[in-house]
Amino acid sequence: MASLEQARSLIRDVPDFPHPGILTPILGEPAAFRAVIDELAARVRGRGYQRIIAIESRGFLFGAALADRLGLGLAPVRKLGKLPYKTDRVEYALEYGTGTLEAHVDAVRPGEKVVIVDDLLATGGTAAAARRLVEKQKGTVGAFLFVVELRALNGRDKLRGAEVDALIEF
């Protein structure tokens, strides 16, 4: 049976691709991926969430599997110009400039309690921007959930006011 330790052992550092960060080959190992989704689901199940908000791009993979496992709705948050319908958008600061995130205008229903899912918490800017999109649509972010967190970058500081959880920390 796979565990989070097996998943942790699969994570490799890939310097400067496409920007400095960590990629997760967990996706190529079915038992490790299943263990990660099992653990993510255990941290969300029964807590009154109505929707998973998944951040582009690896967040889609974890978020979709988690939404399916829990029987929740899924809404993608993407970079500018990638969604086919009318969108809400927010601009946010990056280490190397600015970025824009979008969600369909009906991604979150007013009053919905959501959890934002991504593979990696680094500086927290992208996740904070995703929260702004949810709040723009009158939803509530109850939690942020990540597979990996780079603690030294203090990303949690930008996510105050909601629970922040990561399965694996570096």
Image: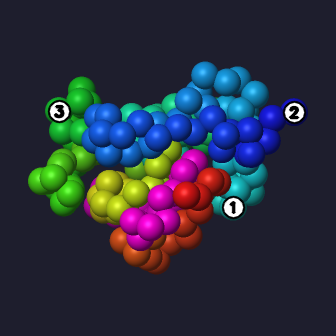
Across and down, in percent, residue 7 comes to 68, 39
At mark 2, the secondary structure is: loop
The segment highlighted magenta reads 133-155
* CB atoms of marks 3 and 2 within 8 Å: no
Across and down, in percent, residue 33 comes to 67, 32
Badge nearest the viewer, 1 or 2: 2
The furthest residue to the left: 97
Look at the image and tell me whether residue 143 can be seen. no
At mark 3, the secondary structure is: loop
Locate residue 22: give its quadrant: top left
Q: Amino acid at mark 1?
A: Arg
Above/below status of 56 relative to 154: above
Seen at 52% across and 31% down, the residue is 61
Q: Amino acid at mark 3?
A: Gly
Q: Is residue 157 left or right of residue 105?
A: right
Question: Counting residues from the N terminus, which is met first, the one under dot 3 or under dot 2?
Answer: 2
Q: Nearer the viewer, residue 164 or 22?
A: 22
Badge nearest the viewer, 3 or 2: 2
Seen at 32% across and 45% down, the residue is 20
Look at the image and tell me whether residue 144 can be seen. yes
Quadrant the C terminus occupies: bottom right
Across and down, in percent, residue 24 comes to 53, 36
* CB atoms of marks 1 and 2 within 8 Å: no
Q: Which residue is mark 3?
A: 81
Q: Which residue is mark 1?
A: 47
C-alpha distance separating marks 1 and 2: 26 Å
Q: Amino acid at mark 2?
A: Met
> Dot 3: within a 10 Å radius of its alpha carbon, few (fewer than 14), some, or many (20 or more) residues?
few
At mark 1, the secondary structure is: loop
Seen at 47% across and 41% down, the residue is 13
Quick check: is 128 in the magenta stretch? no
The label on residue 1 is: 2
